[in-house]
Image: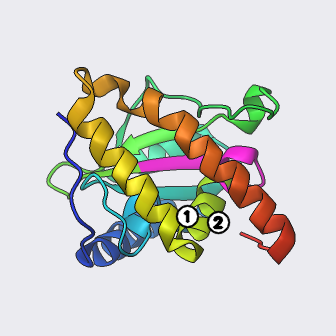
Amino acid sequence: MIEICSYRSSWADDFVQQASALHSALGPLALRVDHIGSTSVPGLAAKDVIDIQVTVEDLSVDLVTQLTGAGFVQHVRVGHDHVPPGFSSDARHWSKLLFLERPGDRRCNIHVRRNGMANQRYPLLFRDYLRAHPATAEAYAVLKRRLAVSLADPKQYPEVKDPAVDLIYLAAEDWAGRTGWQP
């Protein structure tokens, strides 16, 4: 079962701890480490899992070796992101590596994406748009809570949620164009 909980201010501190470990593990390979996802939006209800994006130049074997050597667990079945309607389906724009927390650490998903790719921009813009639009964030929280309660198969949660996320993202792209937003 999916559990959506009220916002916790401790999520920001949890991110800082994980980001420090990732910076230590990757050194200069990590161009930036960002708190993304619902736990990065103050006031937004979320699953109690910290989502982190590590931006790199290349999805290299060295990167995998350094992260696994530091104890992070690679999720090998995930190698790309969902492609929103109207975007190029070119795999280079949506490829990623996914890692999970080190044994004993708090739950987190570590998305490693290449700098300048569409999937690297997507979560940053989505996060910043929700931070700037609390009513949209609140509506999104209502949707997530209803899905968590209504879906018989929790594995369907991301599949059902993706179109709503895309709707928010498309509005965010318009907002970014009007405001000059940059990641």
Compare residues 123 and 85 and report the one nearer the observer: 85
State the image coordinates of residue 48 (x, y, percent, origin top left).
24, 56
Q: Is residue 143 above or below residue 13?
A: above
Q: Could you tell me which residue is drawn at 55 percent across and 64 percent down?
A: 127
State the image coordinates of residue 26 (x, y, percent, origin top left).
50, 60
Mark 2 vs mark 1, foreground winner is 1
Residue 72 left/right relative to 173: left
Mark 2: which amino acid? Answer: Leu
Q: Give the class, few, some or many, for how many residues have Cα within 10 Å of label 1's Cα (few <14, many ≥20).
A: many
Q: Please count the marks in the image.
A: 2
Which stretch appears magenta?
A: 110-121
Q: Is residue 14 magenta?
A: no
Q: Is residue 81 above or below residue 119?
A: above
**Residue 180 shows in the view:** no
- Marked residue nearer the N-terminal end (2 or 1): 2
State the image coordinates of residue 125 (x, y, percent, origin top left).
66, 62
Q: Is residue 181 above or below residue 152?
A: below
Q: Could you tell me which residue is drawn at 25 percent across and 51 percent down?
A: 102
Residue 102 left/right relative to 35: left
Q: Quadrant of the C terminus?
A: bottom right
Mark 1: which amino acid? Answer: Arg
Compare residues 104 and 10 and report the one nearer the observer: 10
Residue position marked by numbered label 2 in the rendering: 31
Determine the secondary structure under disc 1: helix
Residue position marked by numbered label 1 in the rendering: 127
**Residue 52 shows in the view:** yes
Compare residues 145 and 56 and report the one nearer the observer: 145
State the image coordinates of residue 58 (x, y, percent, origin top left).
70, 46
